Amino acid sequence: QVQLVESGGGLVQAGGSLRLSCNASGRSFSTNYMGWFRQAPGKERDFVAGIWNGLAYYSDSVKGRFTISRDITKNTVYLQMNSLQPEDTAVYYCAADLYPSGRTWRGNHWGQGTQVTVSS
């Protein structure tokens, strides 16, 4: 069993920044296969960024603005979000056991989510 706990969400003005954290615990796993997804009201959960086999991957909508990183010693994955825009407003979810699926990504374990709201 893997437990994922996200933190760092909140309310920010357009152009601002936030850093999300995801602390993982439980059975043996690797932070080398973790990622972030987001879900806006009425929309599907979409891939945002991920670390997979040592490389970082981003959706086109966040490339150049968001950065994913990890601290192996803390079993924690981060998502630094800069130049936030109202369209980034969503619940952000951390995922473990990330894997490619067709032209997108999926995860096997999920956190409870953290709300990010960007005001215009």
Image (tube, rainbow, N blue to C red):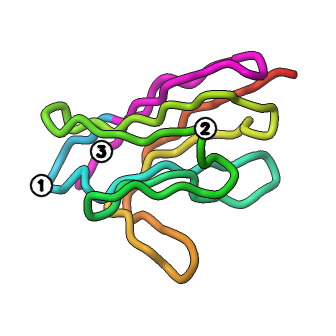
Q: Secondary structure at mark 3?
A: strand
Q: Secondary structure at mark 1?
A: loop
Q: Quadrant of the N terminus?
A: bottom left
Q: Residue 32 in the image: state x and y as whole percent.
A: 25, 55
Residue drawn at x 35%, y 54% as measured from the top left: 34
Reading the image, the residue beneath label 1 is 28
* Amino acid at pointer 3: Gln
Left or right: residue 51 versus residue 47 is left
User: Nearest the camera: 72 or 3?
Assistant: 72
Left or right: residue 14 versus residue 3 is right
Give the crowd class for mark 3: few <14, some 14-19, many >=20 residues within 10 Å.
some
Q: Which mark is residue 15?
A: none
Reading the image, the residue beneath label 2 is 65
Residue drawn at x 49%, y 31% as measured from the top left: 80
Residue drawn at x 39%, y 71% as measured from the top left: 99
Q: Is residue 108 above or below residue 74?
A: below
From mark 3 to mark 1, how far is it between C-alphas? 11 Å
Q: Is residue 42 above or below residue 116?
A: below
Q: Main secondary structure of the magenta part?
A: strand
From mark 2 to mark 3, how far is it between C-alphas? 28 Å
* Amino acid at pointer 1: Ser
Q: Which mark is residue 3?
A: 3
